[in-house]
Image (cartoon, rainbow, N blue to C red):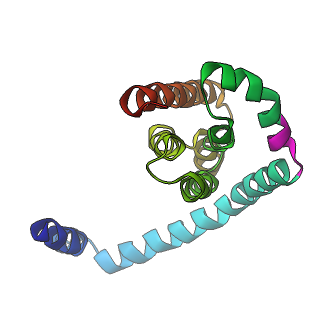
C-alpha cells in the first residue's frame, strides 16, 4: 500500500515534468503554450456557466415543487410489488441529470440506511454503474456547439436505464434484499 501511495503522490508531477521536458526538447515554447491553454480553459469555463446554472435551477425546482415525491409515491405500489425500495427512485431519476446531486442523495441514503444495508449497497452500485447523461450532453455538447444530440441522448438514457436495472439485479443476487 505504501508503494501505491508513493506512486500516486509522484505520478502527476512526473507527468507534468515529462511533458515540459519533451516540449523543451522539441523546442516548443512551453510556458507560452501553457498560458494559451489556460486562457482557453477560462473561456470554456465561462461558456459552461449558463448550462450549469440552467441545470441546477431545473433540479432545484423539480425537488422543491414536490414533483419528485409525487412521482415516487405514484410508483411505490409497483415498485413494492417487484421488490424495489421506493427510496432509491429519486437517485435513479437524478443520476442522469447531475452527478453532484446524485452523490448527495447517495450520501443521504447511506447515512439514513447504513452502508451495509440493501439500499446503501444499491445506491452505491447505482452511482457507479450509471452516468450523468443529461449533464454530459448539456454541458459538453453545448460547449462545443453540437445542436443535434438526439441519438446520443437515446443511447445515454438507455445505458443509464440498463445500469439501474443491472444494479438492482446484481445487488439483489449478491446481497439479497
Locate residue 72 relative to residue 2 in the image: left or right. right
Q: Which image quadrant is residue 81 in?
A: top right
Front residue of this view, candidates 114 and 66 = 114
Instruction: Residue 147 in the image: state x and y as whole percent.
Output: 68, 36
Locate residue 155 relative to residue 90 in the image: left or right. left
Q: Residue at x 58, y 48 (%)?
A: 140
Locate residue 16 relative to residue 114 in the image: left or right. left
The magenta region covers 65-70
Farthest left residue in view: 3
Does any portion of residue 151 appear in the rendered image?
yes
Point out the image quarter for the N terminus: bottom left
Q: Residue at x 60, y 51 (%)?
A: 102
Farthest right residue in view: 65
Q: Residue at x 45, y 38 (%)?
A: 129
Instruction: Residue 107 in the image: state x and y as whole percent.
Output: 56, 58
Inspect the magenta stretch and tell me whether residue 76 lies in it: no
Rendered position, 76 above or below 39: above
Does any portion of residue 20 appear in the rendered image?
no
Assign the magenta stretch its main secondary structure: helix
Front residue of this view, candidates 92 and 28 = 92
Instruction: Residue 8 in the image: state x and y as whole percent.
Output: 21, 68
* Number of numbered discs visible in the structure rendering: 0
Front residue of this view, candidates 161 and 115 = 115
Q: Which image quadrant is residue 133 in?
A: top right
Instruction: Residue 14 in the image: state x and y as whole percent.
Output: 18, 72
Amino acid at each position: 500500500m505504501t508503494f501505491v501511495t508513493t506512486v500516486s503522490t509522484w505520478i502527476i508531477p512526473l507527468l507534468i515534468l515529462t511533458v515540459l521536458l519533451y516540449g523543451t526538447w522539441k523546442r516548443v515554447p512551453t510556458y507560452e503554450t501553457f498560458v494559451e491553454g489556460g486562457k482557453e480553459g477560462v473561456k470554456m469555463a465561462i461558456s459552461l456557466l449558463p448550462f450549469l446554472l440552467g441545470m441546477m435551477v431545473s433540479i432545484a425546482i423539480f425537488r422543491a415543487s414536490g414533483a419528485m415525491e409525487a412521482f415516487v409515491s405514484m410508483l411505490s405500489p409497483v415498485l413494492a410489488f417487484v421488490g424495489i425500495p421506493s427510496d432509491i427512485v429519486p437517485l435513479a431519476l437524478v443520476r442522469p441529470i447531475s452527478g453532484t446531486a446524485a452523490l448527495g442523495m447517495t450520501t443521504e441514503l447511506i447515512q439514513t440506511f447504513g452502508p451495509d444495508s440493501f439500499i446503501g449497497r444499491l445506491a452505491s452500485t447505482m452511482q457507479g454503474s450509471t452516468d450523468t447523461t443529461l449533464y454530459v450532453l448539456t454541458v459538453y455538447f453545448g460547449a462545443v456547439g453540437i445542436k443535434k444530440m438526439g441519438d446520443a441522448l437515446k443511447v445515454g438514457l438507455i445505458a443509464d436505464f440498463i445500469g439501474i436495472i443491472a444494479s438492482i439485479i446484481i445487488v439483489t443476487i449478491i446481497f439479497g434484499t
